[in-house]
Amino acid sequence: MQPKQRYASRESYPNSLLFFRSEDVNANTEYLTHHHAWGQIICVKSGVFVLNVAGQRFITPSGFALWIPPHIQHSSHNQAPTRFRSININDCQMMPTQACLLSLTGISHAIIDSFFDRKITVPQSAQDLRLCQVLIDQLLSDPWQHTYLPSSHDKYLMPIFSALERNPADNATLAEWAKRVYTTERTLARRCQTELGITFNQWRQRLRFLFSLSLLEQGKSVQDIAFAVGYSSVSAFITMFKQIAGVTPDCYRHNASRQRSIK
């Protein structure tokens, strides 16, 4: 099925330090390549948002945010339903000059929630303008990271990662993958560290976690999800999920559902 193509909103508010938007994206939706004069923080509220920013692929799970600097070409294609908010920043002098992933702290979440709860698109009151500045200061102190699931154009790694993204349940070992792409296990292990900064098993675990988030959003059972992402036992999957998310899959789904019902 051909993806549904959408154009990103071009509406801007150049006289405002910040302005806000919220969007719900249907499954198999593509945002065509575009750029803005302003910087943009994409806060993913549910699902997993996949963006291509200046030729680099970013996968952003629910609870994370992605910073896109001004004038940087970007696009997205999301296979599953996704809900996100954008915090658009006109004055970006202090912000990073490259796209990166952001783990929002409780303070940042509370300020952002306050604006959306009050349905404020463009802050205008003196109090809200001060709150905007506090948010900027907080964003600069929140932890940043390059990406959650790094990608690579390496001739050996790229076909492996593409295959695993199509089928995360593939349990082939690194040695088995080496045979498939006609190289050695040692070469693949070295290139994972050089290209990604993490091991092959760490990369695959992150991929499976991201896929499990999407399946949770679709209402799949924990058992079905565990098998779909390559685990032979439900308990092993729950252990992995809890190590990354801090809660069990059922608890994560319950919290996400409750958050959506509140908004």
Image (spheres, helix red, strand yellow):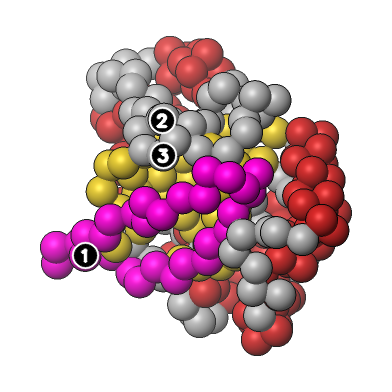
For label 1, the crowd category at 10 Å Cα-Cα, with few meaning under 14, some 14 to 19 and many 20 or more, is few
Distance, label 3 to label 2, CA atoms, is 7 Å
Check disc 2 and report the residue beneath it. Answer: 72
Query: Residue 53 versus residue 97: which sits nearer the camera?
Result: 97
Q: Amino acid at mark 3?
A: His
For image coordinates 41% across by 30% down, the residue present is: 72
Query: Residue 85 versus residue 64: which sits nearer the camera?
Result: 85
Left or right: residue 96 compared with residue 163 = right
Q: Is residue 173 visible?
A: no
233 within the magenta span: no
Q: Looking at the image, is mark 1 or mark 2 earlier in the sequence?
A: 1
Check disc 1 and report the residue beneath it. Answer: 4
Q: Amino acid at mark 2?
A: Ile
Check disc 3 and report the residue beneath it. Answer: 36
Where are the magenta residues, as a range? 1-28
Question: As drawn, which residue projects farthest toward the left?
Answer: 2
Height in image: 57 above or below 49?
above
Question: As drawn, which residue projects farthest toward the bottom?
Answer: 261
Height in image: 99 above or below 251?
above
Instruction: Locate the N terminus by quadrant.
Output: bottom left
For image coordinates 26% across by 48% down, the residue present is: 32
Query: Residue 118 at x, y = what percent?
Result: 71, 75
Q: Nearer the viewer, mark 1 or mark 2?
A: 2
- For the stretch drawn in magenta, the main secondary structure is loop
Instruction: Locate the C terminus by quadrant.
Output: bottom right
For image coordinates 70% across by 33% down, the residue present is: 144
For label 3, the crowd category at 10 Å Cα-Cα, with few meaning under 14, some 14 to 19 and many 20 or more, is many
